[in-house]
Amino acid sequence: MINVFQPTLGEEELAALRDVFADNWLGHGPRTKAFEEAFAGHLGVRPEQLLFINSATAGLFLSVQLAGLGPDDDVVLPSASFVSAANAIASTGARPVFCDVDPRTLNPSVDDIRRAWTPRTKAVVILHYGGYPGEARQIADLCRERGALLIEDAACAVASRSDGQAAGTFGDLAVWSFDSMKVLVTGDGGMLYVRDPERAEQARRLAYHGLERPSSFGAAKVSHRWWEMQVREHGQRVLGNDMTAALGLVQLGRLPEFVRTRRRHAEQYDKLLADVPGLRLPPPLPEGHETSYYFYWVQVDPALRDRLAAELLERGIYTTFRYPPLHRVPVYKSDHLRLPATDEASESTLLLPLHHGLTPDDVETVAAALRDVLRQLTGSAGHAGTDDRLPAATA
Ligand SMILES: *Cc1c(COP(=O)(O)O)cnc(C)c1O
């Protein structure tokens, strides 16, 4: 079985966990702090702006609270988002307003965001599809110009950059995910970035019950009733811990190597699949952009996509699609909404296996199977009957 995503863990991670056990400190502590500092260095931001939490989803729920969203507000986001973004928005009573995306990159353009804007738009949530930074910079400019907050769901974009600037640092708030199928994994975990220093302090309080001062042995030295609580806001309990932070520190060190390996696999797919009739490959990265190579996505005739996935599964190759459009999901269903590019992409796109545990042979196996299945599905070899239903394969 060739998996679509898979983590790589080894002796180094195990040794880091052993150290945590030896210190007998599992909770939020020195390793959490060290991970925040190291990740800040990786992004080029200040450590105080980062908070290691237990998932990206928790970070999205914190972000909407920090953004002060409520029932009178609209939030623009692509329908092709992960559901936790919409869930976070809806939890505040605000209304998610879905925008369209580019049919090939599955990222919204700044015009897509502009078209969906309403007079009540108070925030925008974008992600970086498969790691491609997209127009995050231009979208951040638009938000600033119109006085709305930009929240970046950078779950796909742990090593993505646009002209040297890390994806996730264009807007006001951002989250990264370290869940077990991401590029950098901690089991469960996430990072929250908060641009504004005061809001970053508020984030720290809200992530731990709203406590203004953590109760701890340290506090006993400065207060005679150290168990009393100062709570002025409704907090949550979403902090990360030193076990997951220890894993994160090791994985962050290995990240450049992970991304290099993924890049090699993506380039190998590009080569092996370049001339397959009826198959569209990921569009080239714009000049100055860097990706984390989280997804390798191909696009085929919508009439073939599901059968292609089923046939590949028969051959032990697991593929999938991200992110099923939210305007088609029961809880967010909106029948009148017309998002043609999102619909087109969601019917034609398939993610091929891409992770740093793959070997070049695996990539070759997947590419050969894909070629073979497509040939079967479209009839004879070289049959280009599906081609005319697809726009030109070049950028
Ligand atoms: C994985 C993912 C999430 C959720 O991350 P968790 O850490 O599991 O909460 C959110 N958004 C996107 C785009 C993702 O890919």
Image: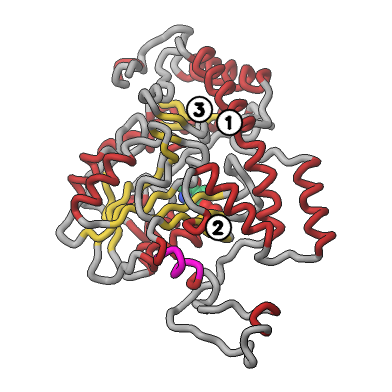
Within-10-Å neighbours for mark 2: few <14, some 14–19, many 20+: many
Q: Secondary structure at mark 3?
A: helix
User: Which of the two discs, 2 and 1, labels the residue nearer the N terminus?
Assistant: 2
Q: Write down the residue under mark 1.
A: 259
Q: Is residue 275 magenta?
A: no
Q: Quadrant of the C terminus?
A: top left
Q: Nearer the viewer, residue 182 or 325?
A: 182
Mark 1 in CB contact with mark 3 (< 8 angstroms): no
What residue did someone put label 3 on?
308
Q: In this orientation, which residue lies closer to the viewer: 329 or 220?
A: 220
Mark drawn on residue 55: 2
Q: Nearer the viewer, mark 2 or mark 1?
A: 1
Q: Could you classify mark 1 by the number of other residues whose Cα lies within 10 Å: few (under 14), some (14-19), or many (20 or more)?
A: many
Q: Amino acid at mark 2?
A: Ser
Kindly identify which numbered label has been placed on residue 228.
none
Left or right placement of residue 339 versus residue 264 in this view: left
Which secondary structure class fits the magenta region best? helix
- Residue 191 vs 217, above or below: the answer is above
Picture coordinates of residue 160 (x, y %)? 47, 36
Q: CA distance from mark 2 to mark 1?
A: 21 Å
